[in-house]
Amino acid sequence: MELIKFIIKRLLNGLLVMVGVIVLIFILFNILPVNSARMTLGQRADTASVKAIEKEFRLNLPWYNRLMLYFNDLSPISLNNIENTDAPSYLNPEDVKFAKLFSVSTVSVVVKMPYLGKSFQTRRKVSELLGEKIYPTFILAISAMALASFVGIILGVFAAIRQYSIWDNTILIFSTFGISQPAYFSGIILAMIFGYYLKDWTGLNVSGSLTDLDYNGEITIWKNLWLPMFALGVRPIAIITQLTRSSMLDVLNQDFIRTAKAKGLSYFNVVFKHALRNAMNPVVTSISGWLAALLTGAFFIEKVFNYNGLGLLTINSLLSFDFPVVMGSVLLVAFIFVVMNIFTDILYSILDPRVTVK
């Protein structure tokens, strides 16, 4: 029962966070002194065309009205003035699939999927654009996190059991260097060395997307994943290494470890079955948080390697003032952050009985 209350409380907190993010992002992209309609059509567009675009995207309304309508679009349960296509709250059935619950006068209460609007540039739904690009970015983030977790935990354990040795000092030097490097800097170095100078031996490309089209349809080019994956994984490898080392050293000094040694348990069992298992809680928390953080880190990596994913789409949309796409991308990443934080809190309370569920 306490766990259920804990989960409900975290879900409500996450909902409040998302509301705050929506307000902040909307205000940020609607106070900029940019005429989005004119940027869409070009500086030589006639006044009538600009007015039509402003009406289509509700740019002719005050910002606070647009904010309320944006919440209405994002909400799964929303209002729809289906009898008046000129009403700002009108949802086009071609853009949004909805089911009517009931009507009050000319306004209907409908249930639908969240609607992120349409792109200024392509007129395509933002959700479709994000859906096409999230897969390469998700694969990049997952693979980088898997690499960082595997390598970081192994190096951290090895450094802890060889404390103050040359191996421990070497691992600490490299992990400190890795923490201090921005992801895009690591990407540039890796692309230059392994994608340019050593290309004949590695077969890797300086840039390229995970997927491409040929005569047989869409294909996956896995070799284009390796360099972005390593570049994105450098910092989490370093952090997980130091965190695992610190946690392991703390656990190895506990009384139950000395008791396990005194009972004659093998060194392997003491280290991996008892010490590592009890040292994993902060590491698991770090890994869960980093998985969401890597999605934003991937934005810069995708630009460096021209990796056609969510990050490259967001950066290109920002440069072309395609604000609905940028806002949708930011909200998607924020939603993933909130979900991962809730998941981490729940997982941490389950793994560590010392954590009080409140």
Image (cartoon, rainbow, N blue to C red):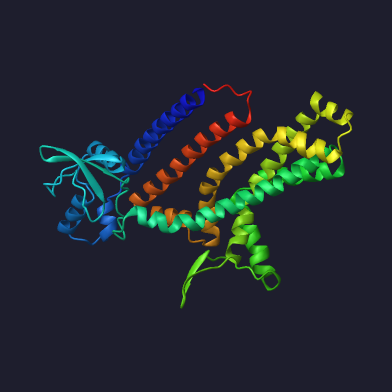
Any part of residue 254 in sight = no
Q: Position of residue 39 (x, y in %)?
A: 29, 56
Residue found 54% across the figure and 43% down from its top: 293
Left-right relation of 318 to 277:
left
Q: Closer to the camera, 277 or 157?
A: 277
Q: Is residue 171 left or right of residue 140?
A: right
When the figure is inspected, residue 29 is found, relative to residue 282, above or below; the finding is below
Which sits in the foreground, 102 or 60?
Answer: 102
Location of residue 124 in the rendering, given as x and y in whole percent from the top left corner: 31, 58
Query: In screen coordinates, is 330 left or right of 57?
Result: right
Give how far across and how far down residue 128 sits, in percent: 36, 56
Measured as percent of width and height from the top left, residue 91 is found at: 21, 48
> In the displayed structure, does residue 222 sit left or right of residue 259?
left
Q: Which of the 4 quarters of the picture holds residue 15?
A: top left
Q: Is residue 12 depicted above or below 326 in this figure?
A: above
Q: How many marks?
A: 0
| Rendered residue at 18%/39% (across/down) | 102
Task: Determine the residue located farthest toward the bottom in the rendered image.
Answer: 215
Which residue is found at the position 51% from the left and 53% from the top? 138
Return the residue nearer the eye: 128 or 180.
128
- Which image quadrant for residue 157? top right
Residue 95 seen from this side: yes
